[in-house]
Structure formats: structure tokens, C-alpha cells
Amino acid sequence: MSAAPLLTVRDLVAGYGNAAPVLRSVSFDVEPGSITAVVGANGAGKTTLMRALSGLIRPAAGELRFDDVDLREVPVERRVRHGLAHVPQGHGVVAELTVDENLRLGGLWRRDRADARRAVAEVYEMFEPLALRRRHAGHQLSGGERQMLALGRALVGRPRLLLLDEPSLGLAPKAVAQTMALLRRLRDESAVAVLLAEQSLRGALSVADRGIVMSQGQLVFTAPAKDLRDNPHLRQLYLGF
Amino acid sequence: MLLERFVFLTLDGLARGTAYAAFALALVLIWRAARVVNFAQGAMAVACVYVAHSVTAATGSYWAGFGAAVASGLVLGAAVDFCVMRLAAGTASHLNSVIIALGLVLIIQAVLGIAYGNEYLPTPAPFDRTAITVGEFVLLSPFDLFVIGTVAAAVAALAWLFGRTPVGLRMRAGAFAPEVSRLLGVNVGGMLTLGWALAAGLGAIAGMLVVPTELALHPHAMDLVFVASFTAAVIGGLDSPPGVVVGGLAVGLTLSYVSGYLGGDLSPLATLLLLLAVLLVRPEGLITRAKVRRV
């Protein structure tokens, strides 16, 4: 973990409209090929953080660097070209499009059309249920299948950093475990870095390398996930279990 | 004699209905992309027909005028979105867009009146409008066949664009889920402008097909056509392109039967009664898919 950070966030302030900012001076780094879990209660600012990173909301202040790129200068549509993929809360599957169309949509921006097609084929290999339902519309899928589709669609862009917002939301425990296992596999085999916002603390910390604890829009504690997971005192203090 | 008349009215209604369907499809393109009923569609189409009139007068070629109408429709549609409708984008109420569209109607019709005058200008059809007769049966005219063929080609082209091309996929995704599409690299604003351009281009085609069958060209030439096409769009379901085609044919047939059997003066009333009946019985349209669950 000595490489230069892939993502650098410094003193980030962001919110919605003229209301008081939700995020207040948040700073952290994400290392290449690592999984960073952002944990915290409802309203802690996890989703706002994800939306600020992907450009869906404009930060009021602070620094956002992705590699050597100042993300504040990059429009939301262009961030995917830099290797930043955001799977929003609720999975963000386009309900009216088929599975195949959703996946192709994930690679339409790419110049290398052949590799985009290859990436779609790899997603079908990775998620067999999707291969069996490629002509089905998004709204016909189960919660687990929609999660696979949203994740698979992000992977078609061959991202370097995945922003996953509550991927376990509404999923059965078995599907959550499968998702976490997949993230581990992505990190180990493809060196994809993951920033994982989760309320499911045990699931997130079981797979993460580092944990970030947020509360009321502020980063209150950061430590190796192992420490948060294994130290009852820290767990009780910051995570309440 | 009764059968011959019925066949004639049916065929005439289908020919008229295809043009209504094309115009209604233009309304649906905008509705699906921006959730706006473009009340300026009729006035924009008339403006394009005036452009065609000028080009045809200058060149002596109907087809040069037809091409100019389509081109001006594409440009006008893009300009309306880019220069006007984006002012209302992001506001909480879609009513703002509707009011802007109604304002556009007044502006376009006033400008056309100033530029061309309010008198009726003759608009010749490119093909003979005399119906072909087989035995006792009066069938379609060559112009009717041209109308049906042109609309069929336009609908097929749109179906290919939306169903088979990356641009069509981007446009559909941008309309259904703009935020997610932006995250996936889709220029949603650009796709919306393209949608407006295509809709206005299609509206221009519909105008070129309808105006020769109406009294003549004048700034209000498409007003009643707009009402009929809007009815067709509501009947078919504003979210359903295939439904709109069926709706257009239904309106065309209704108007043809009413004007044929009851008198032409009752046609506008029949359109409004049809619209009222559909809104009372099935406001989501007769041919709509089950509501898509948001995921």
C-alpha cells in the first residue's frame, strides 16, 4: 500500500442547493487495487460523498484528484473515461432496457469497440443468470440480478475505481455474501480499487482493506478494516456493535 | 353503393391517419425524452412548410422544397431545445415548458404572418390527388400512396435508429434514466437536442404530407391537425410509439367516417369527443404497456 493514491480527497465540502453542506471537510485517500469501506448510519453522508466523487453534485470546496486529474474540472459524463465508475444506490439499472442493452450502454463511450464487446462477454461469463436473461427488461429481474447487472455494466467500462453505494440494499444475505466475494475477486484479479459505501458493516469490513467511519457528514475515524473488525473497543466506539 | 362509399372512406381515413400518426409520433418523441407535450409542434411544422414553399418557388423543384423542409425542421428542433427549452430545464414544474411552447406558437405564427402574410398560399401535391378507381370502388390516390409510403419509411427509419444503433440506445437511456446515463458517459443534453431535432424533422415531413390535403398553406394550417394528432397520441399512449401509429389510424378513420356520413363540419367536434372519451375511459392510452417498475 505504498503506491501513490489513486483517489485523493481533501477538505471536501458538498451538499444540495443552498442548504447547509452535508459533507464537512472530508479527507481520505484510496489506494490502487484496494477496497475501502465507508461505513456509517443513515444520514452520515455516504451517498452524498459518492455523488460528489462522481460529479452528480458539485462540491462547494475541497480538492478531488483522481490520479493526476483534478476531478472538479471533469464533467460527470467524462469521468467514466478516466476510469471512475459509480453504481448508485438502488443499483441504477435502466428498467426499460434489456439486460443486453444495459450492458452495452456501459461500454458505448469506449473507442475500442472490440474490447467493449469482449467485456460484455466476460460479464456474461461472470454472471451466468444474466446470460440466461439477456433479452429480459431490467424491471423483470430480481434484486440480486439487478445488482449483478449494475455491477457488470460498470465493469464493461474496465474501471480503475468503482464507487459502490449500498450494493447490499434490499438483497438477501446470500446475495450480499456473493457480492462481497466478487469485490474481493475484482481487487485480487483485476486490481480494481473499490470505494464501498455500506450500512452492512460486517459485510463491508469482511472484504475491505481499510475502513472509513462517517458520522453527520464528517469523517470521524479511519483505520485498517482488520482493526475495526477485530478490535471490540473500536467497534463499540465507532460502529456500535 | 353503401359498400363502395365505406371502402372509400376507410381508405381515405387510413391515408389521413398515417399522416396524423407521423405527427403524433413527433409529439411522442419529445414526450419520451423530455416529458413535455410540445404544443409548438404544429407551428414549427408550418414554418418548415413555408421554407419548402420558398425553396420550391425559387428552384421550381418540389423535392428540393421537401428536403429543405426536413432540414429546417431538424435545425429548428435543435434550436428550440438549445435556445428556448433549456431555459425551463431544471425548473420544478413541467408547466413552464408547456407555457414556453405555447409562447412559441404565438411567436412563430406571428413571424410567419409578417413574413408571408396571412392569406392562403396554394401548395401543390407532388403526385396526382385523384383517386384510382377499380370498377365501382374508388381507392387511394397516388398522393395517398406517397403519404403512406413516406410515413412507413420514416417510422421504419426511426425504429432502426432507436432499436439498432448506439445513438438510439443512448437516446433511450438518456430519456429513461438521465442520471444513470450521465454516469455511463452519455451526453444526455446532446441526446435531448437530437430528439428535438428528429421530432421537428418528422413534424416537418408530416406537415408536407398534410398541408396539400388541407385548404392551403397559412400560419394556422396545422392547428386542427395538431388537435387530431394530439388525440392520436393520447389514444395510443404518449409513451408508446406503436400505440401512436394505431391511434393515428383510429383518428383518421373516425374523422373520415364522421365527415363522410355526418358532414365535414362535425370533424373537429368528433376529434374532441374522441379525446374526451379516451381520457375518461383509459387516460393512460388504449395501447400502453404495464407500468414499468422503477429499479
Image (cartoon, coloured by chain):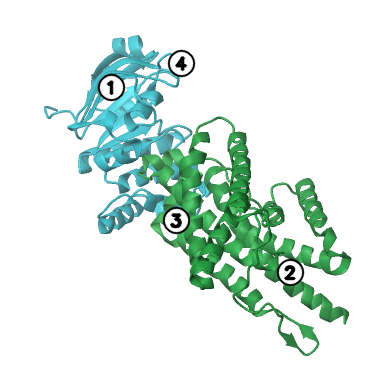
Name the residue rendered at 35%, 27% in the picture. A52
Numbered disc 4: what chain?
A
Quarter of the image for the C terminus of chain A: give it. top left
Q: Which residue is mark 2?
A: B13
Q: Which mark is residue A211?
A: 1
Mark 3 falls on what kind of element? helix
Furthest-bottom residue in this view: B135
Q: Position of residue A188 (x, y in %)?
A: 21, 39
Q: Nearer the viewer, residue B52 or A64?
A: B52
Q: Residues within 10 Å of mark 2 (few under 14, many from 20)?
A: many
Q: Nearer the viewer, mark 3 or mark 2?
A: 2
Give the residue displayed 25% in from the left and 40% down from the top: A83
Of all chains, the one bearing label 2 is B
Question: Which residue position is annotated with label 4?
Answer: A19
Q: Which chain is cyan?
A: A
Amino acid at dot 3: Gly
Which of label 1 and label 2 is nearer to you?
Answer: 2
Splitting the image into 4 quarters, where does residue A65 fall? top left
From the image, tell me which residue sits under label 3: B168
Residue B267 image-quadrant placement: bottom right
